[in-house]
Image: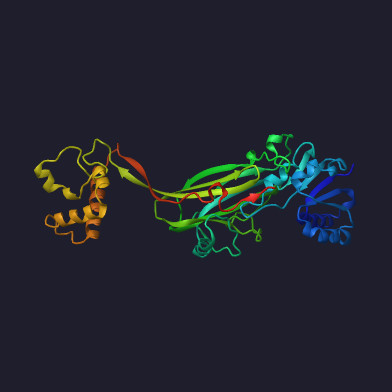
């Protein structure tokens, strides 16, 4: 029995080139190519007659429905499955869904070789004003694959968010995406990663990358300067914009949320970005609380020697009842007579910040703890696929 190969249309050219390089006759194999787009069937048939000696069985169909076609009964099980449906973000060309119905034990030999063998997806915050300007003029709820890599990655190396493995699976209708039934929840993914950016700047969104093991130790990737990988020039990073860019400072932490959602007939991505800063919060045993207000009622002498003017101190309840700007102006006017160094509202703000830092540093103790303060937050983009979806049917 001759080994059987399953290819898509792009992989066919490379497969025959590899056979020529190895001096192996294509007549030793049964080769099947599946192409969904009817517009290229004329070209494929011409190539089959001119370059492939009509040795390729070209099927104009969706690979997700191959298991239910009559072609299944004509050929033995596959010994090798080759696909080039790798997108800029790895899974954004729906390779997991397209491989699902092929990679079952009913169609593949138990030792079937898959190329690629796996798919890893990565994200990173990026600085890219040019791409963000274009996205903001169209839609911030879409995935973009730019023609030029006009982006600066704000991490030393992007963070992995999820992976897909290509291997033979037992036939299970609840874990197979086909055109006849859409049980695709097993291809859903969700991840939240936190990191400290290695570069300061303005983040305009997320960049999506991929890394894939084709076979054995052969790896293809579009990651920035991956070790040992110098090709993959045709795969540019994907871009997930955020509506309002966020500033990143030294010591800040950024949290990236991204989700791959699979419904009955569609696949889409959702994403958001949060920024955090850690601040020192004195314990209740210290003389100063987080707002700088003494825990007990101060004496008249203490009011005169307090580092922060008493009129500038306000509790959370007071700030909720009064207008912040009006209260701040009144406080500054009242304390100008007490402290001659305050001349403007900026001076007063700087004075409060400096006093808080002095109090926090002088009152620090082993019982002090850090508080994680959110300094920036984006909305969840493309929620429920309102901006874009990849249709399965």
Q: Quadrant of residue 286?
A: top left
Who's the residue at 77% across and 46% down the image?
A: 81
Asked whether 197 or 108 is in front, the reply is: 108
Question: Visible in this render: residue 157?
Answer: no
x and y, in percent, of residue 324 in the image: 26, 52
Judged from this view, the residue extending furthest toward the left is 301
x and y, in percent, of residue 282 in the image: 28, 40
**Is residue 180 shown left or right of residue 297?**
right
Colour mode of the rendering: rainbow
Number of marks in the image? 0
**Is residue 110 shown left or right of residue 226?**
right
x and y, in percent, of residue 335 in the image: 15, 54
Asked whether 197 or 362 is in front, the reply is: 197
**Is residue 47 shown left or right of residue 223?**
right
Question: Visible in this render: residue 141?
Answer: yes
x and y, in percent, of residue 62 in the image: 76, 48
Q: Quadrant of the N terminus?
A: top right
Asked whether 368 or 164 is in front, the reply is: 164
Who's the residue at 23% across and 52% down the image?
A: 352
Asked whether 337 or 61 is in front, the reply is: 61
């Amino acid at each position: 029995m001759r080994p059987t190969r399953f290819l898509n249309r792009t992989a066919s050219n490379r497969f025959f080139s590899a056979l020529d390089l190895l001096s192996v006759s294509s007549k030793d194999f049964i080769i099947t190519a599946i192409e969904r787009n009817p517009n290229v069937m004329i070209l494929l048939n011409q190539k089959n007659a001119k370059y492939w000696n009509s040795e390729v069985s070209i099927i104009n169909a969706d690979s997700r429905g191959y298991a239910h076609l009559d072609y299944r009964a004509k050929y033995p099980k596959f010994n090798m499955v080759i696909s080039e449906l790798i997108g800029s973000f790895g899974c954004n060309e729906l390779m997991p869904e397209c491989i699902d119905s092929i990679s079952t034990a009913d169609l593949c030999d138990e030792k079937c070789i898959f190329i690629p063998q796996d798919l890893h997806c990565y994200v990173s915050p990026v600085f890219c004003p040019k791409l963000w300007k274009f996205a903001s003029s169209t839609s911030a709820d879409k995935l973009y694959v730019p023609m030029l890599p006009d982006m600066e990655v704000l991490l030393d190396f992007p963070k992995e968010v999820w992976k897909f493995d290509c291997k033979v699976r037992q036939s299970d209708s609840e874990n197979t995406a086909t055109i006849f039934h859409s049980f695709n929840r097993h291809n859903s993914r969700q991840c939240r990663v936190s990191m400290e950016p290695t570069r300061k700047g303005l983040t305009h969104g997320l960049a999506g990358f991929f890394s894939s093991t084709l076979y054995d130790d052969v790896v293809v990737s579009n990651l920035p300067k991956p070790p040992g990988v110098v090709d993959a020039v045709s795969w540019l990073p994907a871009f997930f914009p955020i509506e309002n860019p966020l500033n990143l400072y030294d010591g800040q932490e950024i949290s990236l949320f991204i989700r791959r959602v699979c419904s009955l007939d569609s696949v889409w991505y959702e994403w958001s970005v949060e920024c955090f800063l850690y601040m020192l919060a004195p314990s209740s045993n210290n003389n100063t609380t987080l707002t700088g207000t003494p825990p007990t009622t101060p004496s008249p002498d203490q009011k005169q020697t307090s580092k922060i003017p008493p009129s500038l101190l306000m509790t959370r309840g007071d700030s909720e009842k009064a207008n912040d700007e009006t209260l701040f102006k009144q406080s500054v006017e009242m304390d100008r007579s007490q402290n001659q160094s305050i001349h403007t509202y900026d001076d007063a703000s700087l004075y409060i910040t400096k006093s808080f830092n002095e109090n926090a540093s002088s009152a620090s103790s082993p019982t002090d703890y850090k508080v994680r303060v959110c300094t920036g937050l984006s909305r969840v983009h493309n929620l429920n696929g309102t901006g874009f979806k990849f249709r399965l049917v």
